[in-house]
Image (cartoon, rainbow, N blue to C red):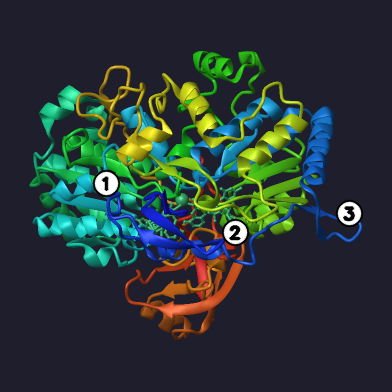
Amino acid sequence: MTHTHCPYCSLQCGMRLERRGRAALEVQAWPEFPVNEGALCRKGWTAAGLRGSRERLTSPLVRDRASGELRAASWDEALDLVAARLTALRGQHGPDSVAVFGGGGLTNEKAYQLGKLARVALGTSQIDYNGRWCMSSAASAANQAFGIDRGLPFPLADVEGSDVLVLVGSNLAETMPPAARHLDRLRERGGRVVVVDPRRTATAQRADTFLQPVPGTDLALALGLLHLVVARGGVDEEYVAARTTGFDVVRRTVAAWWPERVERVTGVPASELRALADLLVGAAKVTVLTARGAEQHAQGTDTVLAWINLALALGMPGRESAGYGCLTGQGNGQGGREHGQKADQLPGYRMIDDPAAREHVARVWGVPADSLPGAGRSAYELLDSLGTDDGARALLVFGSNIVVSAPNATHVTRRLEALDLLVVADLVMSETAAMADVVLPVTQWAEETGTMTNLEGRVVLRERAVAPPDGVWSDLEVMAGLASRLGSPVAFSTDAEEVFSELGRASAGGRADYAGITYDRIREEHGVFWPCPSAGHPGTPRLFAESFVTPDGRARCVSVEHRGPAEVPCDDYPVHLTTGRVLAQYQSGAQTRRIRVLPDDGPFVELHPMLADRIGAHDGDLVVVVTRRGELKAPARVVSTIRPDTVFVPFHWVGANRLTNDALDPSSRMPEFKVCAAAVRT
Ligand SMILES: Nc1nc2c(c(=O)[nH]1)N[C@H]1C(S)=C(S)[C@@H](COP(=O)(O)OP(=O)(O)OC[C@H]3O[C@@H](n4cnc5c(=O)[nH]c(N)nc54)[C@H](O)[C@@H]3O)O[C@H]1N2
Ligand SMILES: Nc1nc2c(c(=O)[nH]1)N[C@H]1C(S)=C(S)[C@@H](COP(=O)(O)OP(=O)(O)OC[C@H]3O[C@@H](n4cnc5c(=O)[nH]c(N)nc54)[C@H](O)[C@@H]3O)O[C@H]1N2
Ligand code: SF4
Ligand SMILES: [Mo]
């Protein structure tokens, strides 16, 4: 019996794994683990299904030059080949000709080691990861406003104590189902749940108040709410004066956002806005949580800043059971952004252009600080530059299925085709692995040990429960094998606990300080919250009670204006397209589409009966969605729960991202996954 955590989302639900026979595993409840109290969603209960799957990769594969097909190879052959080709490219075109792409599903140890592989063994600045497409706008906003980016600055269960919980662009009833019980308990206590979503989702059905804005207008909505809070005298002036700076400018900005103007932009009736503002002003404890619906926009950072301003004006952040938080998405979406796989970062959430940070990390790594490269390109910009004159010519992918999940995916796939060398480490033959020149089969979750940091900043331990299939290596072994073949000046450990203790030293003194966390402490304490700077430190479940992490300890109110989406509907593309998730599938589907008991019906187009009528489509008919970038044919799902001017397509299958817009947020570099202009026809 092994205590571990789910292989999928950021809730990192605790579960127990029981061995059945030689290799089979059975998932069982772990009721004592506080985050999910024994509950799991369908994906969690069925997670062991991929272990027995014939679709697991069990041998390295190398593309045969003559036939163009992938063929089995030994580990030595595959790694020697990769190292030789990377060395040749670096010799000819310099270190930035090799790029690395990571993922928020990787353990902390892997994410840390991947950053080190890039900076030390390859010397490249070109590393980024899929978290850029996830919560990066919220990260950018939280860093500006609070001086720190820990998605939730409090344990998730704290929301149960709120009087009003506002969920902006989160469908947690489908994306983290065990978390939905907090909504029910909050309401049993007499609290109110508010959901803001262009679709009346399963989450909205659990809400007291539902606002249904036009996609891409949450910023205007927040400005309008703050306008009304100011007008009603609802600003906590004492808190604003003592704990924030910059509110005067914000107050002036929102003066221009009267309810009728907001209604014109957002489609939310002024009466609903006024009712919500009254609810907020009358509440002692308000929590605002954003997720991808609000964040995955070219104005995602400013949108989050606007909602943070609202929370600050109401005097909430730092108060018990109140404040602002972001619902991070991937299993290690939080830890994955702290330890150096992001283009501009070193471990411990240190910035790569900070000389003191470079000195500290270089000392831990045993290399000179001036040997470390500077900041590289963000995820989409990195992919967009592949194979161009100043872009990389080789790409190593660990933990992302880019072909399915990147925006404007047809273009990105062409950039991958333009590479001299594509190397993919994966568990299965993902759509991206299928394009690779070299495929490296790696262990998964139950077959290896490592830590994850959940959406609350709680560092948890996944323990190995079963031996991996023959022929499969861990990512740490792959990285060590590559580093030595590349002539790395320092050794790379393959032992997760050893890597974790090195990571602790590298993070010491940084914003995300893990120095006091050990595997034993995690086992004993049901996880440890960072920052945890020393062995005797209890960890930090709650931040901001006394001060924020800015130089003067005050939160920054940053004045922002609504710009609207990069593409607005026109005669040719008259509706809004938005994208997202369904309960039974995870991300690009690489893992969950291979679990037979999970429904896998392919993409669909959700549209309102009025729109269906206008184009002459019935439920189940094939319809075509067209944008400036591509088209997708899929069955119509006619539902009255979506706005009549909006269509929704899940992104778990190839197709949705052929449609999406690669417009980027200027600060976070987040692509605009959640809105573009589209036409839909039969
Ligand atoms: N089942 C399942 N669960 C998952 C995942 C998965 O793939 N499948 N992935 C995990 C990951 S990595 C993430 S990031 C999280 C994501 O978790 P969520 O953010 O909850 O998921 P999404 O479905 O992407 O988007 C949430 C909602 O945003 C709405 N939305 C679309 N456009 C807008 C808009 O302009 N404004 C507002 N307010 N809402 C809008 C959509 O209708 C959708 O209901 O889920 C995690 N959990
Ligand atoms: N249209 C649209 N597109 C989106 C989004 C959206 O809402 N709409 N959401 C975006 C978001 S929030 C996210 S997070 C991304 C996610 O999109 P992806 O980055 O594609 O995420 P996954 O499907 O989880 O891909 C992980 C891949 O790594 C493999 N893998 C799993 N664990 C490991 C491991 O430990 N090591 C290695 N080497 N491989 C592993 C899996 O088998 C899989 O092939 O998609 C983004 N794309
Ligand atoms: S909610 Fe997330 S972590 Fe929990 S069982 Fe489902 S996928 Fe796994
Ligand atoms: Mo995500």
Q: CA distance from mark 2 to mark 3?
A: 26 Å
For marks 2 and 3, give the one nearer the viewer.
3
User: How would you rate the neighbour count of disc 2 (Cα within 10 Å): few for under 14, some for 14-19, many for 20 or more?
Assistant: many
Instruction: Give me the residue at 58% from left, 38% from top.
Output: 128
Q: Is mark 1 within 8 Å of ligand 3?
A: no
Residue highlighted by disc 2: 404
Label 1, secondary structure: give it: helix
Choose the circle earlier in sequence order: 1 or 3: 3
Tell me: 184 left or right of 284.
Answer: right
Residue highlighted by disc 3: 65
Three-letter residue code for mark 3: Arg
Three-letter residue code for mark 1: Leu
Instruction: Give me the residue at 69% from left, 57% from top.
Output: 58
User: How would you rate the neighbour count of disc 3 (Cα within 10 Å): few for under 14, some for 14-19, many for 20 or more?
Assistant: few
Q: Is mark 2 within 8 Å of ligand 2?
A: yes
Above or below: residue 364 compared with residue 387: above
Residue highlighted by disc 1: 156
Q: Is residue 666 visible?
A: no
Q: Quick one: quadrant of the N terminus?
A: bottom left
